[in-house]
Image (tube, rainbow, N blue to C red):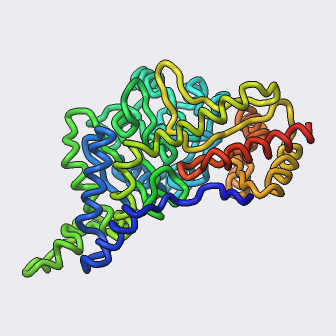
């Protein structure tokens, strides 16, 4: 049996929506992008949503909006995908990496120790779809206002460190009965091909800034900035007599096209109404099986404040080395089951080692990584396939440790 790791969820509704975009004669940014933005806001209760071409671009744009640049520091976890750090580097700021806790997510204590007068933003990352402790982060940020030195209008308005959630994994997750997207100042989702909702490539910026900000105004700014700073998008310009425009910001070109947005428009309602529950059901099957295994460390799913989006099932094996983990993965793969590892901590990657980061400074990040195996989890999996995955993992682990 061959079981892929994360195939896209493409059904008849997706095919019809994409065909509709093709037949409309308009495939770049237009009405389907706006429809997707409205749907994200509707289901997450975000004040405003802007869709862009990737979550990485979304993080960069949010950082630029806050005026972050050379000399500024942005706190990020050492355990995340490289894009979190690269977004900071691309806008000229300095990423400050801190260690994580046993649930994979950023350590509040380590954030506290890392905040300086140069800190402008904290980017918590919801690893595998498990929400960070946002209330604790908010309390910490409020307690550090005496250190915050605003350098522009937006920073003066907010008066504190910006909380910019990297929620690439966690659309559909909840924190204190709120869907992520409406919990922090700005939240960025990913719609990459392997995510719970996809547009092949893409991302969304959810804006929920406190007063005196007017979120619609900030959406308008970000939208313009995402289109080279142009005052009209191509769809508006194409209307009769609508050719004249202006360039008012040194913007980026990171807009999402309609042909991709169409996939998300078809997927998103079904996701919140049924396919998210299917992911949760698979998560529970894994949980039920691995609970009886003394060698298994189960990933977090639910507590009194949080429910995961079940993007990844990040299984850990007790008391094994990195090389033993790799042997187990090889055995599972030989059975036709595709598994993965999320993630190599950033200090293990060449670009960050060259910047002076050392994995020995992040012991929890390495401890989580060295024994982690991500199992397939997506709504197309059936009972027979799940049973095969479980047996393959069980045999591989128990024949190795």
Q: Where in the figure is residue 385, as x and y percent of width and height?
A: 67, 49
Q: In this orientation, which residue lies closer to the viewer: 38 or 150?
A: 38
Does residue 394 appear to the left or right of 220 in the view shown? right
Q: In this orientation, which residue lies closer to the viewer: 188 or 197?
A: 197
Where on the picture, by quarter, is residue 397?
A: top right
* Count of all numbered marks drawn on residues in the image: 0
Q: Where in the figure is residue 165, as x and y percent of width and height?
A: 45, 40
Q: Where in the figure is residue 308, as x and y percent of width and height?
A: 51, 34
Q: Residue furthest left?
A: 241
Q: Quadrant of the N terminus?
A: bottom right
Q: Quadrant of the C terminus?
A: top right
Q: Is residue 346 visible?
A: no
Where on the picture, by quarter, is residue 290?
A: top right
Residue drawn 29% across the image and 55% down it: 222
Residue drawn 19% across the image and 49% down it: 217
Does residue 309 appear to the left or right of 342 in the view shown? left
Q: In this orientation, which residue lies closer to the viewer: 24 or 204?
A: 24
Classify 5 as above or below 242. above
Q: Is residue 205 visible?
A: yes
Residue drawn 25% across the image and 59% down it: 34
Classify 136 as above or below 324. above
Q: In this orientation, which residue lies closer to the viewer: 199 or 387?
A: 387
Q: Where in the figure is residue 336, as x and y percent of width and height?
A: 77, 58
């Amino acid at each position: 049996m061959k079981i892929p790791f994360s195939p896209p969820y493409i059904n008849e509704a997706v095919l019809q929506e994409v065909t509709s975009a093709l037949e409309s004669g308009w495939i770049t940014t237009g009405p389907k992008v706006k429809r997707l933005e409205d749907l994200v806001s509707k289901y997450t209760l975000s004040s405003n949503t802007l869709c862009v071409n990737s979550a990485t671009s979304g993080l960069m744009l949010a950082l630029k909006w806050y005026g972050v640049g050379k000399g500024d520091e942005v706190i990020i976890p050492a355990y995340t995908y490289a894009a979190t750090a690269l977004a900071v580097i691309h806008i000229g700021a300095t990423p400050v990496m801190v260690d994580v806790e046993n649930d994979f997510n950023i350590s509040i204590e380590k954030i506290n120790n890392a905040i300086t007068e140069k800190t402008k933003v904290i980017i918590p990352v919801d690893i595998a779809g498990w929400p960070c402790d946002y209330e604790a982060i908010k309390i910490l940020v409020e307690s550090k206002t005496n250190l915050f030195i605003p350098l522009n209008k937006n920073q003066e308005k907010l008066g504190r460190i910006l909380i910019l959630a990297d929620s690439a994994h966690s659309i559909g997750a909840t924190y204190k009965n709120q869907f992520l997207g409406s919990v922090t100042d700005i939240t960025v989702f990913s719609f990459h091909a392997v995510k719970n909702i996809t547009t092949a490539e893409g991302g969304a910026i959810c804006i929920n800034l406190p007063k005196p900000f007017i979120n619609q105004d900030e959406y308008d700014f970000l939208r313009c900035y995402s289109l080279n700073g142009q005052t009209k998008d191509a769809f508006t310009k194409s209307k009769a007599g609508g050719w004249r425009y202006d360039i008012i910001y040194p913007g980026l070109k990171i807009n999402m096209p309609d042909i991709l947005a169409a996939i998300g428009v078809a997927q998103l309602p079904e996701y919140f109404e049924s396919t998210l529950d299917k992911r949760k059901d698979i998560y529970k099957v894994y949980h039920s099986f691995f609970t009886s295994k003394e060698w298994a460390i189960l990933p977090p799913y639910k507590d009194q404040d949080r429910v995961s989006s079940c993007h990844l099932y990040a299984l850990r094996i007790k008391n094994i080395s990195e090389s033993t983990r790799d042997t187990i993965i090889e055995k599972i793969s030989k059975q036709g089951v595709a598994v993965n590892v999320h993630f190599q901590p950033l200090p293990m990657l060449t670009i960050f080692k060259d910047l002076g980061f050392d994995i020995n400074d992040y012991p929890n990040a390495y401890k989580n990584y060295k024994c982690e195996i991500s199992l397939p989890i997506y709504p197309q999996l059936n009972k027979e396939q799940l049973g095969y995955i479980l047996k393959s993992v069980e045999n591989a682990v128990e024949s190795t440790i």
